[in-house]
Image: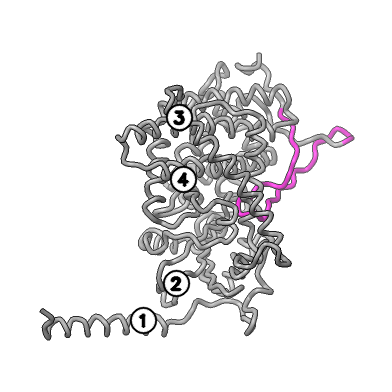
Amino acid sequence: MFTLSHLCACFCTLALASWAFGRFRRLPLPPGPPRKFWFGNEEILPWDHPWRQYAAWSKTFGPLIYLYAYGRDILIVNEASAVTDLLETKSTLYARRPTWSMVALTGRQDNIAFMDHNERQRKARALLQGALNPRAQKSWGPILEEETTSLMLQIAQSPESFRQHIRRYLGTYITRFTYGRTVDDSELKLGDEISIHTQQALRPGRWLADAVPLLLYLPDWFPGMAFKRWARGARTKFIDYTAQPFQQARSSVLDGTEMQGMVPDALSEIIAGTSKYKEEELVSAASSIHTAAIETTYAILMNFLILIMAHQDVQERAYQEIASVTESTRQPLLSDMTAMPYIDAVIREVHRFNPVTPMIPRSPVKTDSYKGYRIPQNTWVMFNIWAMTHDPNIYRDPHQFMPERHLPLGHEDSAKDPRDFTFGFGKRICPGLNLANVQIFLFVTQLLATFEVRPPLKADGTEEDVVIDYSSNFVSLPMPFKCRLIPRSGNAILY
C-alpha cells in the first residue's frame, strides 16, 4: 500500500538527485587552452608525442587539462596522485574504456583491452590471471626458458636479423602457451600484419570516424568511405588469426588429440561441463593475449636494446652481476631473479624511460567531480603515464637513464616502481604482468650473458652515436635502429 511515508521518501530521493545534479552542473570544468566556438581545441591537438606536449601544458594549466574536440570532452591527467583517487578509489566508475569506432570495425571489440567492464570481460580476465599467475608458472616457466635460450642461438647465427628473431620468439612462445602447439612462418607473418593494423586503428587523429561517428552509418560506396574497406580487410585477417586457432583447438579436444595449453585445457573443462567459464569468455582471453602481449613486449625489448647500447657503463655493470651469479657456466634462469637486484633496476628504468603505452584511456560511466571540477559522463580521460614517469617530484633527473635510482641508497628507499604505472590500474590492470616481468627478465639476462650490445661502425671504424627517439603510436617503440650483437667469448651456450 502506497502511504504518505512512501510519498515523502520518493520526494526526498528526487530532491536529493536534483540537488546532486545541480551541484555537478555548477562545478566548473578543469582549466585548459582557449577553445574556438565551432572547433573547440581541434586545431591545437598535438599528434606528435602528445604526452610530452600535455606534460608541458601542465606547467601552465595544472595537472588536469580539459580539452574539447570533435564533439568530445577530453581530460588529460598528468598527476600520479589522481591515479589513486580515480582509478583505485573509484575503480568501478572508471573501469570503462572510451569508444573507438575503428576498434569495432576491425573486430577488436571483444578484446579484453577494449571491452566494457562487464561480466564477459571480468571472466576473461580471470581466465588469464589464473593461467599466468606465479602459481601456474611452474608449468609454463620451463617452456619460456627453453624458447629464450633458443632465441639466443638464432641471434648468434644471424645477428643482423635480431628483430625478426625476437618477433618470432614472442609469437612462438605465445602460441605454445595459448594453444599448446608450434607456429609456422605464414601465421607469424599474419600476426605481424595484425599488430600493424591494431597500431593503425588506434592511432589518435588518424581516422575521422573516431571524431564523427555518424560516418559509420553511411554506405560503403559513399565518397570518403575508404576507411571502411580497409577496416573490413583488417577484420578478416584478425578473425583468421584468432578464430581459426581456437576452432582447431576445439576440434582437437573433441577428438582427443589436444596438447597442453591455456585454450585446450580450459576447453576440456568447458565441454565437459565442469567449468565456471563459457567459450565466448575463453575466446576473449585467447585473442587478447595472442595479439596484445606480443606488441607491448616487443616494444619494451626494443627499448631495452637501444638504451643498453647507448649506456655501456650500465651494460657492463649488469653483465658483471649476471656473471657473478651464473659464473658464466650456464644461462640465467627464472630462479635467479631474486639474486640480481641491479638487473631488476635496469628493467624498471627501461619501463620508466619510455612507457610502451604512454597514455592510458578511461571513461566515467556517469558524471563525476574531482578537486572541485566536473568530469562529464563519457569524457575521454587520458592518464598521461609518460608525464608521471618523468615527474621530477617522483624521479630525480627524469630525462636521464639511471637504473641506480631503483636501488636502496643508505637509509633512503629506492624510487617508486614505474611498473605501478605502466601495467595499468584498478580493475583494468594488465592480467599478464607476471608473464611480462619474467619474460623480460629472461630476455635481458640471457642476451647480456650471451652478447655484447654495441653501436654500428662508421666507415672509418669508429662507432656511430646512438640516437634515441620513439614513435607516436598507441604502443610507442624506438624508431628503427641498428646494433652489433657480439658473442661473448666463452659463453656457455655458444662454445
User: Residue 16: image x %, image y %?
Assistant: 27, 82
Q: Are marks 1 and 4 in contact (CB under 8 Å)?
A: no
Which quarter shows the N terminus?
A: bottom left
Where is residue 165, by image quadrant?
Answer: top right
N-term-proximal mark, 1 vs 4: 1
Q: Identify the element where label 4 is drawn.
A: helix
Q: Is residue 149 magenta?
A: no
> Measuring 66% from the left and 56% from the top, which residue is drawn there?
472
Scheme of colours in the image = one colour
Q: Is residue 56 visible?
A: no
Q: Magenta stretch: dominant SS?
A: loop
User: Residue 354: image x %, image y %?
Assistant: 60, 50
Q: CA distance from mark 2 to mark 1?
A: 12 Å
Q: Which residue is mark 2?
A: 377
Q: Is residue 461 magenta?
A: yes
- The magenta region covers 459-485
Q: Which residue is mark 1?
A: 21
Q: Amino acid at mark 4?
A: Ser
Q: CA distance from mark 1 to mark 3?
A: 51 Å
Q: Amino acid at mark 1?
A: Phe
Question: Closer to the camera: disc 3 or disc 2?
Answer: 3
Q: CA distance from mark 1 to mark 4?
A: 37 Å
